[in-house]
Amino acid sequence: MFDIHNPPELGRPLSAYSHAVEVAAGYRIVYLSGQTPMLLDGSVPPDIETQAEVVWQRIAIALAAAGMDCSHICRVVTYLTDAADAPAHVAVRARYLGDARPASTGLVVKALFNPAYRLEVEVTAAGPARA
């Protein structure tokens, strides 16, 4: 489904990602909007660990609606409002991605749409074409 490209000229990836991920012909692509840590009741957990868990649960739910799971993720973009939150987010992300190594971008931004959000994550996934 994916061809991973980590050319030696770019050096070894610094963590659990790939420099480039190629999706094979014939696969369908699903683009998820940025998923936030807002719960269904409109509340936002205060700590980064719970916020990250909520975000990745939402990603898994959205992918399931498309007949996919986290193993189908080929690209991740993470927005954090504090670089110090990265290790906590990476630990949660690793539980959901397992051995997958999608292409990945991480950004530290001044703020997100809701000031209570400490992160937002958007993903692109690819899966087999529907029959």
Image: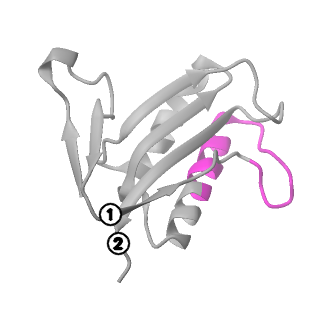
Q: Is residue 111 left or right of residue 62?
A: right
Q: Which residue is mark 2?
A: 129
Q: Nearer the viewer, residue 24 or 10?
A: 24
Mark 2 touches mark 1? (CB < 8 Å): yes
Q: Secondary structure at mark 1?
A: strand
Q: Hey, what amino acid is under mark 1?
A: Tyr
Check residue 44 for magenta coloring: yes
Q: Is residue 10 left or right of residue 94?
A: left
Local packing at callout 2 (Cα closer than 10 Å; few below 14, some 14-19, many 20+) is few
Sequence-wise, the earlier of marks 2 and 1 is 1
Q: Which residue is mark 1?
A: 27
Q: Nearer the viewer, residue 107 or 26?
A: 26
Snapshot quadrant of residue 20: top left
Q: Position of residue 92 (x, y in %)?
A: 50, 43
Q: Position of residue 63 (x, y in %)?
A: 51, 63
Report the magenta residues as a range.
Answer: 38-58
Q: For the view shown, which residue lies furthest in the right direction?
A: 42
Q: Hey, what amino acid is under mark 2?
A: Ala
Kindly report the distance in space between the C-alpha atoms of the residues bearing marks 2 and 1.
5 Å
| Residue at left offset 56%, top offset 43% | 122
